[in-house]
Structures are given as structure tokens and as C-alpha cells.
Amino acid sequence: MSYFYKEIPSPVGELKLVASDAALIAVLWENDRPNRVKLGELILKPNHPVLRKTEKQLAEYFAGKRKTFDLAVEFVGTAFQKKVWKALAAIPFGKTLTYAEIARKIGRPTASRAVGAAVGRNPSSIVTPCHRVVGSDGSLTGFAGGMPAKARLLQLEGHTTLRR
């Protein structure tokens, strides 16, 4: 399957936005691990309506004018991953959860490590806020965009006491 993309600058580095005909598929990082998110052929289409809308809403988020995203997001992954990503999408602006809390929320209380793996493969970073997931002691944990980007996103949302 082919997807459309455009690249945009942001306060946390260059982002690659990827969409299908009707929905956001991914927000990828400048130094993303190859194959962290498996996609088909990517076709440059900077004026694609979903990509333009995503870019506008991300700009509003970075400017402190948006706390939630109003975008159609299509999750491409396993049933377990989709369940985790939906739980991520439900974490409110300014709040954090641990991997264990997400595992409990999806009805798999002993699956913290599997939740961590699914969070690591979240294709739509920022929009589906995996940056809001922290370690059980409140520490910042792995993040596809890098720890400085995760800290910056959390600071943007008002967090000042997270451990690094």
C-alpha cells in the first residue's frame, strides 16, 4: 500500500507526517530507527489535506494553543498494539501514566513489558501521546524521538518534576 508524506520542522526536530487517503498513519522522527514503523511506498504530497491539517494542529500544539488533536488516525498494527495505542490516545494533556497503569487499563495487568514494546512502536508520536508514558518511579524512559524531545514535550504540557 502507498502512503503520502511531507516533512515539517518542529521544536523537537524534523517530523515526517504520513497519511493514507483519509487518515494520519504516522508521525516519524528525524532519526527514527529504520523499520520501527513498517510502511509501504511513500509518495511526497505536501498539499495532501490530512497532512496539512496535521501540520496545522501540531503547530498549534507547539504554540501552546492546542491540547487535543482532532484528526482521523488509522492505527496499523496488531490487535494488542492497537489496544495500547488507543489507551495512549486517552491520556489527557498534562498527565502521565506508567506502563503498568496502561497494562491494567487494557485488562492485561502483567503485560507491562509488552505494553512497553507496543508503546515503542507507536506510529503517530505526539498525536498519540506516547511521550506521556513514564517509568514506575516517574522517570523518563525510552522514546523514539529521543529523551530531550520527550522532556521538551512534557515541559510544554506543564511537567517540571519528572526524573531523568
Image (cartoon, rainbow, N blue to C red):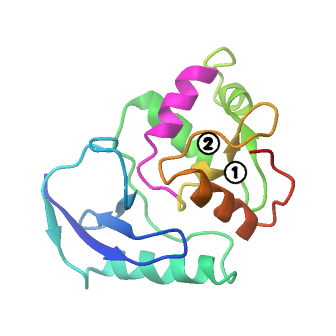
Q: Position of residue 19 (x, y in %)?
A: 29, 64
Kind of residue at disc 1:
Ile
The residue beneath circle 2 is: 87
- Position of 159 with respect to 123 (left or right) is right
Dividing the picture into quadrants, the one containing residue 17 is bottom left
Q: How many other residues sit within 10 Å of disc 1, few (<14), some (14-19) or many (≥20)?
A: some
Q: Which residues are magenta?
A: 112-125
Q: Is residue 89 visible?
A: no
The residue beneath circle 1 is: 91
Dividing the picture into quadrants, the one containing residue 157 is bottom right
- The tag on residue 6 is none
Q: Position of residue 28 (x, y in %)?
A: 38, 58
Q: How many other residues sit within 10 Å of disc 2, few (<14), some (14-19) or many (≥20)?
A: some
Q: Residue at x 26, y 79 (%)?
A: 48
In-front residue for pair 154/67: 154
Kind of residue at disc 2:
Ala
Quadrant including the C terminus: top right
Q: Residue at x 31, y 81 (%)?
A: 49
In-front residue for pair 17/78: 17
Q: Position of residue 125 (x, y in %)?
A: 49, 56
10 in relation to 2, above or below: below
- Position of 114 with respect to 77 (left or right) is right
Marks counted in the figure total 2
Indicate yes or no whether the magenta region holds residue 62: no
Q: Position of residue 119 (x, y in %)?
A: 53, 38
Dividing the picture into quadrants, the one containing residue 23 is bottom left
**Contact, mark 1 vs mark 2 (Cβ under 8 Å):** yes
Q: CA distance from mark 1 to mark 2?
A: 7 Å
